Image (spheres, helix red, strand yellow):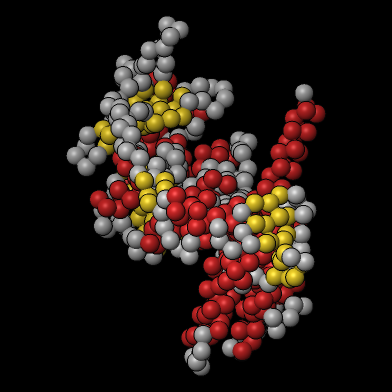
Amino acid sequence: MPYIKFSESQKQRAASVDLEAFLLSQGEKLLPSGREKRLASNHSVTVRGSEWFDHATKEGGGPVSFVQKFYGLSYPEAVTRLLNGEQGEIISAPPRQKEKKEFQLPLRNGTMRRVYAYLLKQRLISRPVLDAFVHARLIYESREPSGKGNPYHNAIFVGLDETGVPRHAHKRGLYSQGPGLKRNVGGCDARYSFHHCGTSDRLYIFEAPVDLLSFLTLYQKGWQSHSYAALCGTSEHAMLWMLEQNPNLRHILLCLDHDEAGIEASGRLTEILHERGYASVTILQPEYKDWNEDLKAAHGLPALPAEEHPQLTVAPSVCQMIAEKSESVKLGSLESGLSGLLCSFQNDVQLNRIGKALDHMDRASALALAAYSRELRQLGEAASGEELTKRMCERILPHQNHSVLKNRHRELAPKVQAVLAQQKAPGIRSEEDKRQMAEAWLDLAVELAKPSIRYEAEELKKWQKQQQDNSLSMTM
């Protein structure tokens, strides 16, 4: 992994930077305090020359530690900032030679009795569907040695390459109790995961082979004319390979699980497809947790319910709160208001005052949303609070909202500055310019709301886990 090496001269220059001059160059306000200067945004912090001290936490140091602590930067980033962008030398470590394991299909068993019993009786897969894949030599039963003497028997789902050579295999344990074994065989190529190539322009994507077979059981009419792939996980490699092999595939249906991981993967895969020019992308969710659970429900059996993503659960209430706040904010000091709230957010994060930090972000988001609402009124398209809430929620994509709080300032500061610069650009705006400005404010409002949404989602998950634990303890 590469690392950045600074010369001794660079380190010394960074360590001797006058903090007062540096902070003024960054737009910070300093207040006189005897022989020192006090930060207007954080009165507990004083600077003098190249030294700083936080009287609240009793911490202090030089310029590098200051920039690391209060700007949330790494050591190389802090030194580069203090040296006005001057870079150190990038040192690349020699790549590790990773020994690649040779792919080999597990040994076949003499019969398919256990696989048929498992997939037909326990998983309720249709016999004609199962027969089709067995006859194509894409499903078989393995017989693998074990340390206890009796061999292991697993269902093996095979993936073939362009020439029909096996390059991938996924194992599924044939146990009647518990989740069972689920893993890919070592050395396999993820591009060639379990799949079926049809002749139509449709490609259906699933997480696991059993999901794929369950969907075909539920919707059997003409299934062989379409193409299907089980990712055996959530990576995009098999999907992209299928599209490369068949340019006729233009309609992609993402049929991943209806749970947190499946929802995030669907969002990420949609972005990948759009970047590659595929406009027709549909997310098709099972009613229950996955397609095999839907199949169970269709047979009148108990089925695991779908699991909504926690961020999508809490987003409406957070966005509604921000929309209500936006109705009472004043836009006269938009630039200083956003910058000040962002700075206060960072300071409170550093002091672990999470509630106060998130309140600053909510107010900043409300400011941006109020600016968006103003642009809409000027376009003659005023939106209600309910509509503003809806538009924000539509842009909450959980797979894009994973950053921890201590890194948010680093990510949000340039986005705020970019929108403010767009707002201050000289000249008369056309209607298209006004619409772009409005969209920029809405996007910023969503970005500033994301920290609260992620925090509330994590709190919801903790509460749900506690409820499950309490329920389990009561039944024991």
Q: Residue at x 78, y 28 (%)?
A: 473
User: In which image quadrant can residue 416 be found?
Assistant: bottom right
Q: Is residue 72 above or below residue 139?
A: below
Q: How many numbered marks, from 0 up? A: 0
* Left or right: 35 as drawn, with respect to 282: right
Closest to the observer: 366 or 15?
A: 15
* Residue 425, image x, y percentages: 51, 85
Q: What percent of the width, then of the height, locates residue 317?
A: 72, 61
Q: Residue furthest front?
A: 35
Q: Which quadrant is home to the C terminus? A: top right
Residue shown at 34% from the left, 61% from the top? 276
Question: Looking at the picture, how far across and down is residue 298, in whole percent?
Answer: 56, 42
Which quadrant of the structure image shows residue 407? Answer: bottom right
Left or right, residue 39 beside residue 19: right
Outermost residue on the top side: it is 149
* Above/below status of 174 relative to 34: above
